[in-house]
Structures are given as C-alpha cells and as structure tokens.
Image (spheres, rainbow, N blue to C red):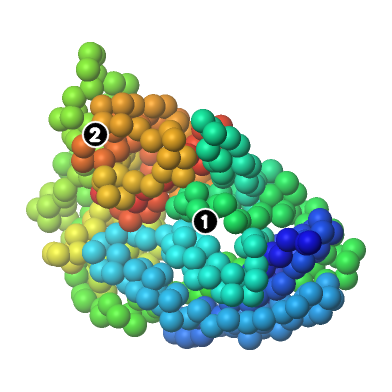
Amino acid sequence: MKKRVVIGLSGGVDSSVAAYILKEQGYEVTGLFMKNWHDTTGLLQSDCHWEDDLMFAEMVAKKLKIPFHMVDLSEPYRQRVVDYMFAEYEKGRTPNPDVLCNREIKFDSFAEEARKLGGDFVATGHYCRKETISVNNTLIHRLLAGKDSNKDQSYFLCQLSQEQLSTALFPIGDLVKPEVRKIADELGLATAQRKDSQGICFVGKVHLPTFLQQKLAPKKGDIIEITEKSVYPTCEDGYPMGEVSEDWLKSITEPFKYQPDTGIKVGTHNGAHYYTIGQRKGMNVGGYTEPLFVIATDVEKNIVYVGEGHSHPGLNRKGLLIKEDEIHWIRRDLKLNDLESHEYMVRIRYRQQLQKARLFKRKEGIYIIFDLLQRGIAPGQFAAWYEEDEVIGSGVISG
C-alpha cells in the first residue's frame, strides 16, 4: 500500500517540484494550501495576495493530477506567530516569524490538518535534508543543510522537534535552485518562472513600522549618537587563563547599557520598538559621511542609540546568552549538561556564514562565545548551532 503524504502547496516553484518528486517516488500525494494571512495593512503594493498563491497552487495540483484542498489557519497564525511578533517588538526584541511559523504552523497546525486527510507524512519545499540514524537503539532524525548553499533553509527549521521531524519530508533538499526551475519548466508548471516570496512568512514584504502600528502606537523619542570617543563596549580576544568563570561569561555577553548623557541628540523617531540592532534605514538623519546604524534601543525610555559607520565598535559583540527556558535541542542525545562546553559552528541570522564559537552550559543557560566579533547581535533572534552540516540545537538570544 502506498504511503500517503500531504504537501504544503504554496503557489511557488519549490513546493510544486517537491510535489512532483514525491509522486515520482511512489507516494500517494495530496496538495494542501494554507491560507494564513489576508490583512493588507503595511503590505507593499508590489506583493501578491494569497488569492494569487491559491490560483497557482490549484494549477499545479491540476497539472500533476493530485487531489487539492485548502485550509484556513489564519487564526492560529495570528495567535502564535503575529501576536508573538508584536509582543517581542514591544519589549524591544527582534523576533524571527519564519522560525516560529515552521514550528507552530507548518509542522504543527498544518500537520494536524494533514493527518485529518490521511497523511502519513508532511512535506514542504524547504531546501534542507533529513536523515534518520540509530543511536543506542533509538531512532534519531538529523536535520541537515540543503545541498544548495545559497538557498539552505535549515536555519528556519532550527526549532523543530524530533516528533515533528519524524513525519517530515524535504524532497528538494538534494537539489539546487536552477535544477528546481529546470524541472518545473520541463513539466510546464505554471510556477516555473514565478518569483520567490519575500518578507514575513505568509504575510509578505511589509513596511515594518506601518505593520507594527496595528498594535504598537507611534511614540516620539530621541535618537542619540554614541561616538567612538564616548563610552562604548570593549571586547577581548581569546579566553581567560585557567577556568572560564561565570563572571567572565556574563561580562562578555551582556549587552552594553548606554545612557542619554553619554551621547548627543541628533534627531527624533516615532517609536524605539520599531527599530532593531544593526538597522541603517528609517532614521532620517542627514549630514554624516558614513551611514548611521542602530547600536541599541531602550523601549522604556523610548531612545534609539546610533553610531556612525560600519566599523563603529557598538555594532560588535563577542558573545551572547540563551536563557535556560529558551534552549532547544534537536539532538537531545547531544544536550550539554551544566559546566560542560563544546565547540560548534553558529549562525545568528539567515544567510549568515557559519561562525566558529564555543558553547558554555551554565545553570542560567548557554553562553555562546565567538572566535570573531559578531556584528548586529539582536535580542529575540535565534542562534542555531551546527556540527558540520547538521543543526544540533537553537535558542532565542536573550540580550
């Protein structure tokens, strides 16, 4: 009897080809389209709305001769992804909705709908791979980077659990994007030359302040420049001699706290909660040789701190902390215990090159200390750690 797989048909080329591959592999394939967002507030006009995606998904299902269904998951998406976004920005943190969307919607709410349709597996068009091994007579599902290094999306799946991975399939993980488009073109799929989606998962490309104003009201405040002659954080190379102390770990990972009197007012903004570390656009402050970058925000005092130029020391940090309740291990068998440490490759944002770092486990969480200074570490984002091309775990950056 054929195994049944329900694939999330998004109306894009990747999921379209993934559905074709699954059918070629002998699965009984059903396409399921998710309607997750239909509010156009803040959307840029050039973006397509969900009706267009639905139309393309239906055309692909018809071409491949597979059953097609649609499910409205807009309510769980709003509660578990969008409301989380608003709450995080209100705290002055920078969330990653795509990571949350995969954990909470695609491999949770969507997976439930797939099971209702009789699906044994859930498939997506992600550029990543899965491998199942046995460790001490226990099946372990490994999440691996996609073969296409330019499109690898394993970072977006860094919060998945073993249970979620157990029924997940990633049919295009061994392909590169040009191969995917070539297959779609040869099959005559309507999505063959369709542009990739951009912006927030299922929402699209937005003007963020306008989007956030749905729940976070504008609030005028000061933009304060911190010059290199002002107080700014210092970072040291290497590790201290002897045992690495908790005090040292805290000192090198805590974000620097600026004060208004350590800089000069250079402008005003409409809300510190609209800004993120490393941001260079949206300040509307002129008269500088180099661009201004956000180096810190204070949502309580409603202050945005900025520094001039790519080399400003306030943009760089040596390490970060992931609090105990924010740590997630995909490979639970490799979980670090208190006082243990391990060297991994880490990334703190999508498309960032993997960075060499050492993870130190302490009772309050995991301290990640990088070999090289890292630019734009933003609280609320996810740090994911890798062993070669396997995602081992991840967590939310606390500060």
For the N terminus, give its image quadrant: bottom right
| Residue 190 placement (x, y as % from top left) | 80, 75
Furthest residue in direction left, as rendered: 261
Any part of residue 246 in sight: yes
Residue 249 vs residue 224, the one in the foreground: 249
Question: Which numbered marker is on residue 338?
Answer: none
Q: Label 2 crowding class (10 Å Cα cut-off): few <14, some 14-19, many 20+?
A: some
| Distance from Cα at disc 1 to Cα at disc 2 | 28 Å
Residue 129 vs residue 29, the one in the foreground: 29
Q: Residue at x 78, y 80 (%)?
A: 59
Asked which secondary structure carries label 2, the reply is strand
Counting every numbered tag in the picture gives 2
Does 46 sit left or right of 299 as displayed?
A: right
Q: Which quadrant of the figure has residue 187?
A: bottom right
Question: Which numbered marker is on residue 362?
Answer: 2
Q: Is residue 51 above or below residue 197?
A: below
Asked which secondary structure carries label 1, the reply is helix
Q: Residue at x 38, y 47 (%)?
A: 328
- The residue where tag 1 is placed is 164
Does 62 sit left or right of 40 as displayed?
A: right
| Residue 183 placement (x, y as % from top left) | 84, 59
Q: Is residue 253 above or below residue 273?
A: above
| Residue 216 placement (x, y as % from top left) | 28, 77
Q: Residue at x 39, y 71 (%)?
A: 80
Any part of residue 372 in sight: no
Q: Label 1 crowding class (10 Å Cα cut-off): few <14, some 14-19, many 20+?
A: some
- Which amino acid is tagged 2? Arg
- Which amino acid is tagged 1? Gln
Sequence-first tag of 1 and 2: 1
| Residue 280 placement (x, y as % from top left) | 39, 58
Q: Residue at x 64, y 47 (%)?
A: 129
